[in-house]
Image (spheres, rainbow, N blue to C red):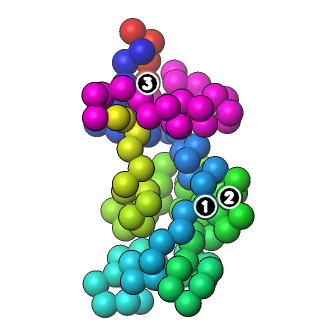
């Protein structure tokens, strides 16, 4: 299977529909140096927030567009930036593969093609 190295997540978005995306509130654009749009989060604790829709896990992130691409990609929070679609050796992240199967994501529709 060949992976689109420039954007292995193109048209997928399963991690955005499965995980609770929680992070330190200092990343919010309402904080000095923050960048994540504050109107898109729910408060969890005095210091932690999460993307709306993901509060309990297994919910769709408010920033996930209908084409299954991130609507705030340049301003996405640290957990989204840090989650690797590809492992260091270039193979797919096993968690991505598990979630793609769970959500029945077809590689042909998400930018990946059979080798």
Q: Which residues are magenta?
A: 88-111
Residue 112, label in figure: 3
- 2 or 3: tag closer to the N-terminus: 2
Mark 3, secondary structure of its residue: loop
Q: Nearer the viewer, residue 94 or 34?
A: 94
Instruction: Name the residue carrying label 1.
Output: 20
Distance of label 1 from label 3 (alpha carbons) = 26 Å
Q: Which badge, 1 or 2, is on the more N-terminal residue?
A: 1
Mark carried by residue 57: 2
Left or right: 109 in relation to 84: right
| In the depicted structure, whether residue 29 falls above or below residue 69 | below
Q: Is residue 1 magenta?
A: no
Q: Is 41 located above or below residue 100 in the figure?
A: below
Calculate the distance from the C-alpha at mark 2 to the C-alpha at mark 3.
26 Å
Q: What is the distance, in whole Å, between disc 1 and disc 2 at their CAs?
A: 4 Å
Residue 68 visible to the viewer = no
Q: Position of residue 26 (x, y in %)?
A: 39, 83
> x, y (%) of residue 80?
43, 57
For mark 2, give the secondary structure: loop
- Taking the image as shown, residue 60 lies to the left or right of residue 89, namely right
Question: Going 47% across and 55% down the picture, which residue do you hit?
Answer: 70
């Amino acid at each position: 299977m060949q992976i689109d190295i420039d954007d292995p997540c193109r048209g997928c978005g399963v991690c955005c529909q499965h995980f609770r995306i929680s992070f330190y509130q200092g990343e919010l654009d309402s904080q000095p140096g923050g960048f994540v749009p504050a109107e898109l989060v729910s408060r969890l604790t005095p210091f932690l927030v999460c993307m709306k829709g993901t509060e309990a896990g297994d919910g769709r992130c408010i920033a996930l567009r209908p084409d299954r691409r991130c609507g705030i990609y340049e301003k996405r929070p640290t957990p989204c930036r840090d989650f690797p679609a590809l492992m260091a050796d270039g193979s797919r992240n096993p968690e991505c593969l598990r979630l793609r199967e769970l959500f029945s994501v077809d590689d042909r529709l998400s930018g990946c093609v059979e080798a």
